[in-house]
Image (cartoon, grey):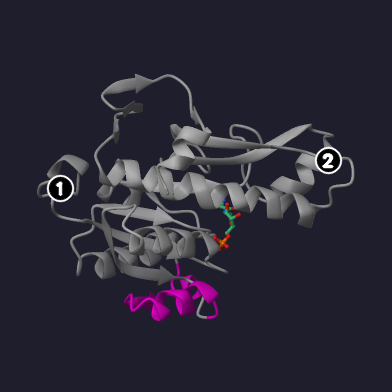
Amino acid sequence: MPNAEQNSGTDQPCEIAVFVSGGGSNLQSIIDHVQQGHIHANIACVISNNPDAYGLIRAQQASIPTHIIEHKHYETREAFDRELLKTLAVYNIKLIVLAGFMRVLSPTLINEYQECILNIHPSLLPKYTGLHTHARALEANDTQHGCSVHFVTAELDEGPLVIQAAVGVKETDTVDTLAARVLKKEHIIYPLAVKWFCEKRLQIKGNKIYFDNSSLNQAIQLSPEHEAQLK
Ligand code: GAR
């Protein structure tokens, strides 16, 4: 089972697998920061359950190996996940990054990569797990909405929170305008969380998150100082 502490020394880039189902703008943001030297990682492969995912093209443009594993060809979630595991086993993956991957992973995969899976979700968790988060925030007349990065556990969109970024909701917002502002923040908090994991500044033990060796009792809130770490 991979573990952040098993990373073979600080000089070795962290081997990452990114899972996508759609546009892959979060993948692109991580690719860009790896290429700019802000994240000490190698994106070893990109895996998609959707053959039409634009994220696959983004990966190919960055010369990253891609794999299409269509969930509809597998009778059970476990069988699909076993196929994902087979593909991952070809690489020496230390971190799985779920970047708009719209399948729920089963314990079959999560237990194998315990403490090594990050997800991004378009809401200020624990609010609005699941789908249609922007519409639900608008319907509830929320004044604040945003996005969260968390470690993945067996529960949907749950698992200890790492970092969140809030955006103010405007009276004139539609689902699309709100989603676009949240996505811009996603493109900052996700590379930051990946960077910190690869630098071993971010770790999870059991259900507890440690950042710079101190336990985190609540999610880090994005600040300009954090953003500066990506410049
Ligand atoms: C992002 O908004 C991400 O937070 C969301 O899908 C979008 C993917 O965009 N993920 C989820 O809803 C997971 N529960 P992208 O493909 O352009 O990165």
Q: Secondary structure at mark 1?
A: loop
Q: Is residue 159 visible?
A: yes
Outermost residue, right direction?
Answer: 172
Seen in the picture, residue 215 relative to 224 is either above or below; the reply is: above
Seen in the picture, residue 182 relative to 22 is either above or below; the reply is: above
Location of mark 1 (residue): 7
Mark 1 and mark 2: span between their CA atoms?
44 Å
Identify residue type, mark 2.
Answer: Lys
Magenta residue check for 182: no
Q: Residue at x 39, y 58 (%)?
A: 33
Q: Which mark is residue 170?
A: 2
Magenta residue check for 57: yes
The magenta region covers 52-75
- The mark tally for this picture is 2
Q: Residue at x 55, y 49 (%)?
A: 186
Q: Which mark is residue 19?
A: none
For this view, does 145 lie left or right of residue 51? right
Residue 155 placed where, x, y %? 48, 40
Seen in the picture, residue 221 relative to 10 is either above or below; the reply is: above
For this view, does 88 lie left or right of residue 102? left
